[in-house]
Image: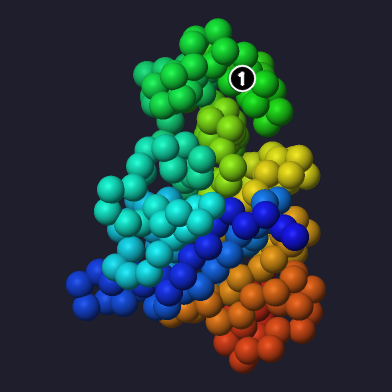
Amino acid sequence: MDELILQVNHLSKTFGNNEVLKDIDFTVCKGDVISIIGASGSGKSTLLRCINLLETPTGGEILFHGEDVARRGANVPAYRAKVGMVFQTFNLFSNLTVLENCVIGQMKVLRRNREEARANALQYLTKVGMGPYINAKPRQISGGQKQRVAIARALAMNPEVLLFDEPTSALDPEMVGEVLHAMKTIADDGMTMLVVTHEMGFAKEVSGRVVYMADGVICEQGTPEQIFENPQQERTKEFLSRTRKES
């Protein structure tokens, strides 16, 4: 039996009169690599931000190992240390070196001493190919390198789940491959990952499950083969045929 880590039940999110997420049900088991695809404005990023509690859900529950972390009084910082997030725009501290960016969160949130935090940070920076740049400041490295530092920083917190919110969308095309390669490496290591992406090749090759969203609902989900080769819903077919034309 696969170990259930996250369970989203009847999740909804409304901004004013705009219902962005409608009755979302979703599960994430240990080792899952799930890609969430869909057109801009379909609710993908809002779903991720609700799961990470950067947005407060309007309704429903988010169970982490069976405990509802969306309830009032839940320990959100402790939860976020276990469910990390990699953003489109890197969110690195510009005044800190690459290494310090990966050390500071471990010391503040996990209370690790500097030596332990540094050793852990170096391990993950090396894994994503950023070992030679540990003394650089963010302004001295490329966008793709910044995103790899952001991935290493998230990994250094030793999360159970990593959420990626369109991690390549702010990058120049030639830098996309290096970030996707780093993500594939950690997926191969068994990291549980939830990835909002426009990169259909990544979704096909690396995911175990693909979720197609439109208008705030999950229209269809299944294996990459089911979604890309034999979609059941008309909307999924239309979306995939559009993305093939665009690529």
Please, what secondary structure does the residue beneath circle 1 have?
helix
Residue at 54% from the left image edge and 16% from the top image edge = 117
- In the figure, residue 235 lies in which quadrant? bottom right
Most foreground residue, 56 or 230: 56
**Looking at the picture, does residue 66 appear above or below residue 213?**
above
In the rendered view, tell whether residue 191 sits above or below residue 197: above
**Where in the figure is residue 109, as x and y percent of width and height?**
41, 26
* Whether residue 46 can be seen here: yes
Residue at the image point whose x is 59% and y is 42% from the top = 160
Please name the residue shown 22% across and 78% down the image.
17
Whether residue 174 is visible: no
Q: Which residue is mark 1?
A: 120
Q: Residue 64's x, y, as percent? A: 50, 53
Quadrant of the snapshot with the C terminus: bottom right
Query: In the drawing, does residue 29 fall left or right of residue 157?
Result: right
Q: Position of residue 60 (x, y in %)?
A: 37, 69
244 left or right, relative to 41: right
Q: Amino acid at mark 1?
A: Asn
Between 185 and 107, the residue placed more toward the observer is 107
The residue sitting at the bottom extreme is 234
Quadrant of the rendering where the N terminus is positioned: bottom right
User: In the displayed structure, would residue 115 be above or below residue 103?
Assistant: above
Which residue is located at x 53 percent, y 30 percent? 157
Left or right, 126 with reference to 148: right
Q: Is residue 48 placed above or below 89 in the rendered structure?
A: below
Number of numbered discs = 1
